[in-house]
Image (cartoon, rainbow, N blue to C red):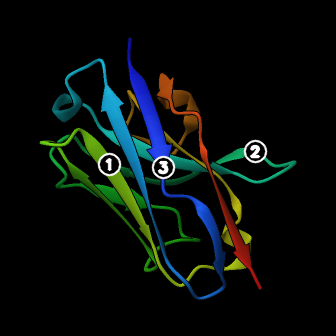
């Protein structure tokens, strides 16, 4: 059974930084692309970023480009999301996912439980 466990969320002031982590188990982590999505209250789950299995290809939503960086450490079975220059609009529950490499949630078949990120103004 694939398990994804996110951590690193919290409350931060606008302009601050957070680094999210997602630890994976249950499949050969280094063989699969990983993605980050987020969902604000009352809104759909939106794409944030994805990274290919080797960590050589990344893609970002326009809203986070230049501020967020996705990376992975295949030796640690972990994917990261470094978030800088945070804005109140970044407030959401952040989810990691595996099984796809696309900006659509429907492309992924396994999801973590999510971690809350709250950015105060």
Assess disc 1: are there few (<14), some (14-19) or many (≥20) residues with their C-alpha within 10 Å of its C-alpha: many
N-terminal label among 2 and 3 = 3
Q: Which residue is mark 2?
A: 44
Q: Which mark is residue 79?
A: 1
Image spot of residue 114 (x, y percent): 59, 41
* Vertical position of residue 107 compared to residue 70: above or below: above
* Vertical position of residue 65 compared to residue 7: above or below: below
Q: Which residue sits furthest top?
A: 1
Confirm whether residue 97 shows in the render: no
Image spot of residue 45 (x, y percent): 68, 44
Q: Residue at x 58, y 34 (%)?
A: 113
Q: Which residue is mark 3?
A: 7
Q: Nearer the viewer, mark 1 or mark 2?
A: 1
Where does the C terminus fall, quadrant-wise? bottom right
Q: Is residue 1 left or right of residue 105?
A: left
N-terminal label among 1 and 3 = 3
Image spot of residue 3 (x, y percent): 41, 24
| Secondary element at tag 2 | loop
Q: Residue at x 26, y 19 (%)?
A: 27
Q: Residue at x 75, y 44 (%)?
A: 44
- Image quadrant in which you'd find residue 5: top left
Q: Residue at x 52, y 33 (%)?
A: 112
Q: Nearer the viewer, mark 1 or mark 3?
A: 3
| Secondary element at tag 3 | strand
- Image quadrant in which you'd find residue 106: top right
- Whole-number angstrom distance, CA of label 1 to CA of label 3: 11 Å
- Whole-number angstrom distance, CA of label 2 to CA of label 3: 21 Å
Where does the N terminus fall, quadrant-wise? top left
């Amino acid at each position: 059974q694939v398990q994804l466990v996110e951590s690193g969320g919290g409350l931060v002031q606008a302009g601050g930084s957070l680094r999210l982590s997602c630890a994976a188990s249950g499949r050969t982590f280094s063989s699969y692309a990983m993605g980050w999505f987020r969902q604000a209250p009352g809104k759909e789950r939106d794409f944030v970023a994805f990274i290919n299995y080797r960590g050589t290809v990344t893609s970002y939503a326009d809203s986070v480009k230049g501020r967020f960086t996705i990376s992975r450490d295949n030796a640690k079975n972990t994917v990261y999301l470094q978030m800088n220059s945070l804005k109140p609009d970044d407030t959401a529950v952040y989810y990691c996912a595996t099984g796809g490499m696309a900006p659509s949630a429907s492309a992924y078949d396994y999801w973590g439980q999510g971690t809350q990120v709250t950015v105060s103004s």
